Amino acid sequence: EAQVTQNPRYLITVTGKKLTVTCSQNMNHEYMSWYRQDPGLGLRQIYYSMNVEVTDKGDVPEGYKVSRKEKRNFPLILESPSPNQTSLYFCASSPRQGYGGYTFGSGTRLTVV
Amino acid sequence: LAKTTQPISMDSYEGQEVNITCSHNNIATNDYITWYQQFPSQGPRFIIQGYKTKVTNEVASLFIPADRKSSTLSLPRVSLSDTAVYYCLVGPGTTGRRALTFGSGTRLQVQP
């Protein structure tokens, strides 16, 4: 089944403890991106990647890192999480930027205490 | 950056046609218009994409006027299961590197 898989689905962590949210797609898509969704603020793009080893900042990149070493994987790294990063995170992919719409993962609900 | 404006909410009844309009006055020449549906605690789901004129698929139609400064998503004969938030996204085509910005979405409530 064609899909975008995020792990974990739920995560509670403490301030300052590094964490990684994984994202993997099995559709050979070139484009991948991360979003956070907060009540009243909609979906905001954190980082995106046009292809392997090509990453760019989105609208809200502060406090996050990404890497794209393989086409299928696009992990989101929080080096020192803070409570304001408590949010619902989505990973998405598409064959190429802008082409055919984006397939989203099921989301990761992160709570930083 | 193409900013989008949509109504915050809409109400409808089962069996009716629903039209949701999105305004995007500063759309760029190579931008596409895409609509997504989102249910609570789920990722957005692709509905339809277009560049100009009219596009139709098995679930919706997308109308884009010649100036492309707005677009209208049309859902024929909605059902209770269409209750969701609908997002209009205006984003770059296959060329150019640019961040994507979703609007605030339209919350559609379908009543029996």
Image (cartoon, coloured by chain):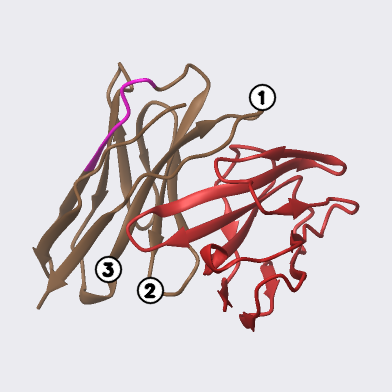
Chain colours: A red, B brown
Q: Nearer the viewer, mark 2 or mark 3?
A: 2
Amino acid on which the number 1 mark rests in the picture: Thr
Reply above or below: B51 against B78. Answer: above
Mark 3 vs mark 1: which is more N-terminal? Answer: 3
Mark 2 vs mark 1: which is more N-terminal? Answer: 2
Tags 3 and 1 on a common chain: yes
User: Which residue shows up at 65% across the image and 30% down it?
Assistant: B94
Q: Nearer the viewer, mark 3 or mark 1?
A: 1
Residue A111 appears in the rendering? yes
Q: Residues within 10 Å of mark 2 (few under 14, many from 20)?
A: few
Q: Nearer the viewer, residue A69 or B109?
A: A69
User: Which residue shows up at 39% across the image and 26% down it?
Assistant: B52
Numbered range of the magenta stretch: B21-26
Mark 2 vs mark 3: which is more N-terminal? Answer: 2
Reply above or below: A83 against B60. Answer: below
Q: Which residue is mark 3?
A: B82
Residue B1 drawn at (x, y percent): 47, 26
Q: Which residue is mark 1?
A: B95
Residue A1 appears in the rendering? no
At mark 1, the secondary structure is loop
